Image (tube, helix red, strand yellow):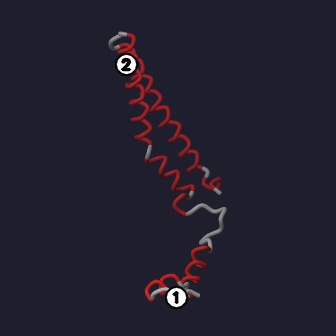
């Protein structure tokens, strides 16, 4: 026990009963370790993927424009690489959207497979 410290220091340094209970409650897991939290459920992850569909399209087009622009500057082929990679970006973006929607339609047709 700390007795030769001033009153205020001994009050803060000496453990109290409530501290042990609080630490024990904090150490206890709230749910089993193998289960993910409810926010990361399969249905919520599917919703997040659907919400990010527009982002997939924008990123694919942005990458195509960026690559095409810098290839045009590097090679000196004014609009050709930009047009080619913009087209490739649009095709890739819509392909990603199609694949995501196809997977979602299949999942909604067979809801018992979600587990």
Q: Where residue 19 sits: x, y (%)?
A: 54, 82
Q: Residue at the far front: name it.
A: 4
Residue 31 position by quadrant: bottom right
Numbered mark located on residue 77 in the image: none
The quadrant of the picture occupied by the C terminus is: bottom right
The quadrant of the picture occupied by the N terminus is: bottom right
Q: Residue at x 39, y 23 (%)?
A: 86
Q: Where residue 36 sits: x, y (%)?
A: 60, 61
Circles 1 and 2, Cβ within 8 Å, touching? The answer is: no
How many C-alpha atoms fall within 10 Å of the one at disc 2: few (<14), some, or many (≥20)?
many
In the rendered image of this protein, does residue 72 appear above or below residue 57?
above
Q: Where residue 68 sits: x, y (%)?
A: 39, 20
Which is nearer the eye, 93 or 39? 39
In the rendered image of this protein, does residue 33 appear above or below residue 109?
below
Where does label 2 land, which residue?
Answer: 82
Q: Where residue 15 sits: x, y (%)?
A: 55, 84
Label located before the other in sequence (1 or 2):
1
Q: Residue at x 45, y 89 (%)?
A: 7
Which is nearer the eye, 70 or 90? 70
Q: Residue at the far left: name it.
A: 78
Residue 25 position by quadrant: bottom right
Q: Secondary structure at mark 2?
A: helix
Number of numbered tags placed on the structure image: 2
Which is nearer the eye, 8 or 5? 5
**On the rendered structure, is 57 left or right of 109?**
left
In the rendered image of this protein, does residue 93 appear above or below residue 46?
above
Q: Residue at x 43, y 48 (%)?
A: 51
Q: Residue at x 54, y 85 (%)?
A: 14
Inter-mark Cα distance, 1 to 2:
78 Å
How many C-alpha atoms fall within 10 Å of the one at disc 1: few (<14), some, or many (≥20)?
few
In the rendered image of this protein, does residue 70 appear above or below residue 26?
above
Where does label 1 land, which residue?
Answer: 4
């Amino acid at each position: 026990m700390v007795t030769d410290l001033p009153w205020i220091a001994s009050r803060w340094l000496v453990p109290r009963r409530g501290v042990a209970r609080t630490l024990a409650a904090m150490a206890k897991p709230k749910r089993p370790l193998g289960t993910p939290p409810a926010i990361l459920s399969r249905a919520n992850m599917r919703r997040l993927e659907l919400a990010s569909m527009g982002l997939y399209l924008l990123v694919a087009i942005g990458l195509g424009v960026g690559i095409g622009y810098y290839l045009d500057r590097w090679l000196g082929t004014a609009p050709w690489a930009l047009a080619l990679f913009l087209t490739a970006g649009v095709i890739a973006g819509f392909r990603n959207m199609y694949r995501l929607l196809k997977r979602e339609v299949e999942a909604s047709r067979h809801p018992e497979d979600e587990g």
